[in-house]
Amino acid sequence: MNAHMTAQFNRRVNVSVCALNQWALDWEGNLERALTAIKRSHAAGSNIHVGVELELCGYSCLDHFFERDTETHCWESLAKILDVSRTLDNMVIVTGMPIRFRAAVYNCMIVLAAGQVGLIHPKSALCDDDVYRESRYFKSWKHGTECQPFNLRQHGIDQDDVPFGHGIVETKDGIKIAVEICEELWCPKSPSVEWALQGVDVICNGSGSHHILGKSAKKITELMQDASSKLGGIYLYSNSRGFDGDRVLFDGMSAILQNGAIYKYIEQFDLEDVEIATAVLDLNESEIYRGKIASLGELSSRSALLKTIPLNVEIVVSKQGALSTPINPTFYTTRQELFHAPSAYLWHYLRRSTAAGYFLALSGGADSAAVAAIVYLMCDKVCQAVKRYQDQGIKLDQAFYLHNKPVTETDPKKLANRLFYVCYMKSVNSSIETETRARDIAECLGANFSVQSIDSIVDSFKTTFADSHGLLVTHSHADYRAQLALENIQARARMVLSYLNAQLLPVTAGLTGSLLVLSSSNVDESLVGYLTKYDCSSADINPIGSINKVDLKVFLQDFAALGFEPYQHVIAAPPTAELRPLREGESKPQTDEDEIGVTYAQLQEIGLLRKPGYHGLFSMFFALSHRWNHLLPTETAEIVIKYFTRYIRNRHKSAVSTPALVCNKYCVDDQRTDHRPIVYPNFAGSFQRLREIAHNMLEHKP
């Protein structure tokens, strides 16, 4: 009797979450990483291990979810996990994969233990926001807490029917476990509410949540911590990490919570392929906490009576020992995230692409300087990790291998010298100031630097056209189209030369493979099409393609403050394309903002109103006229008209924009985040009407 009482007052559970850097369709690698995490959790004494969303196939399979092969390989991987689970005593495992039920495919998490599947939980709230298109591939579960039998033997699993639906599994020692998946946490009526009312002890969330500036802190504190405070119980959240084949970065932040307190978390943007966090928690604390919330108990007494699904395993830890204690985690600010997210993405992209390194056309301006800084920060992040492994005397994680060889550098400048190449591509219109800035930037970062002239390339294009049509274009030609064509030749020549460098520099340096070409076009320029189609904005990947100019200026200031003196000169220099000579009477080149007709600060506000705000021409004007009290309504109207004029004229450029790492909600990447037409009608009538409204507002302004 005393033993029973002791057990009752020592009901503890050791739980674990993980961050996995999975890769779409990497069947062997995904399985190996999932099993590594499971085994590490078991070695740490965990009784419950939660994997990430769609971990067996990778989240970003996209249209590969339509292929039967994807399902088949997932079932093969699941069978191997079930085999391993037979050797892991007293452990519940939660993993994720797509599953076809009747005529539909569902995004599912699977609860299993000791070689047996206990429950298949299909996702009920699909994510179709921003970069996500889950309803293109999956259907949502619409039957509440109803479960249907699912035949496992047809998929090679030696087990009879298993419940498919939203249910609660219960271990032999009375611990109730339930699941919600990623977006279900964000939706207005989360499954976790029902699970709390049913007295579920542990809620497991496998997620594939991508990085957006400031998103992770909100997710942990405003969603999970608030829900845990309101509902009580243990909440386990595992999120994907890194780059799994698409243009998003999964931040990897995972957490263990109980009764509103955070007990463990995995930080954002680390580079290891596998990481776990464990905690030992007191189940009785959840009962006491919930018992003090009268409204929770009252709603629980009214909720439907659900049967639980038995799971043939015991997981309660009755031994005396240290319990985990709550922590107060510190989250990165958005300024700090700009240092970590793009650099982490570039490393994952580089090592999985098997390329030799990166190439960048370095203009000496702010945008390309920011991209160069990101590559240096990538090298710094890797070198810090390598040094940590060396200091601890442990084997280097596979995440720090390139071409199957471990990185040995601990000095970021040396690593940059190994894999980062930049070139200042000058023309007769280039200034000595921008060339000097480019050279100084490369030197302070350790990048390989060269200077190449594009004048002969441009002259050959001009001569070729003149020989055919008798027109020799000049910057002083009477037709502006001829002037613009000459400027575009220069810009496009740099793109061709960039790819030539990317292919041939590894030859001269004795490297394997080719270099990946980096773009340096910010989101504001893409928003209004202030770039040449197929110029240096065309590349393999654009690390700043969804970062606005305002944030980039702050980023450059923070980077310069680390001791990179040449960046002070970049910050002080007005941005200019240097595609034409100074005209008569000009003392300096026209700046980008002069060319656009809208400031970058204004473009940031316009971009956010356009997306995610979804404001059209008139609603944008009225929103801005309330914000911009320092401007007359007519001035605001002209700014809005300038923006829309450029947008409708240049929207087609977004259709071929370089894939951009998604960091911002108004990314203009046509392929993933911005589904709008590429050819627009003339807005002349609407523009005229807007001007009339603005003049009327001005006349009646008090």
Image (cartoon, rainbow, N blue to C red):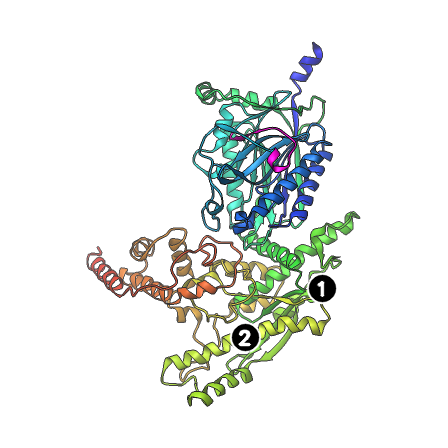
Q: Identify the residue at horizontal 47%, vertical 55% (top origin).
A: 672
Asked if residue 251 can be seen in this view, the reply is yes
Q: Which residue is mark 2?
A: 494
Amino acid at pointer 1: Lys
Q: Position of residue 461 (x, y in %)?
A: 50, 83
Of pointers 2 and 1, the one earlier in the residue sequence: 1
Within 10 Å of the Cα at label 1, are there few (<14), some (14-19), or many (20+) other Cα atoms? some
71 w.r.t. 584: above or below: above
Q: Indicate the secondary structure of the residue bearing disc 1.
A: helix
Read off the magenta span: 153-166
Placement of 578 over or under 60, stated as above or below: below
262 left or right of 414 in image: left
Q: Nearer the viewer, residue 458 or 172?
A: 172
The residue positioned 38% from the left and 60% from the top of the image is 677
**Distance CA(mark 2)–CA(mark 1):** 27 Å
Q: Nearer the viewer, residue 24 or 415?
A: 24
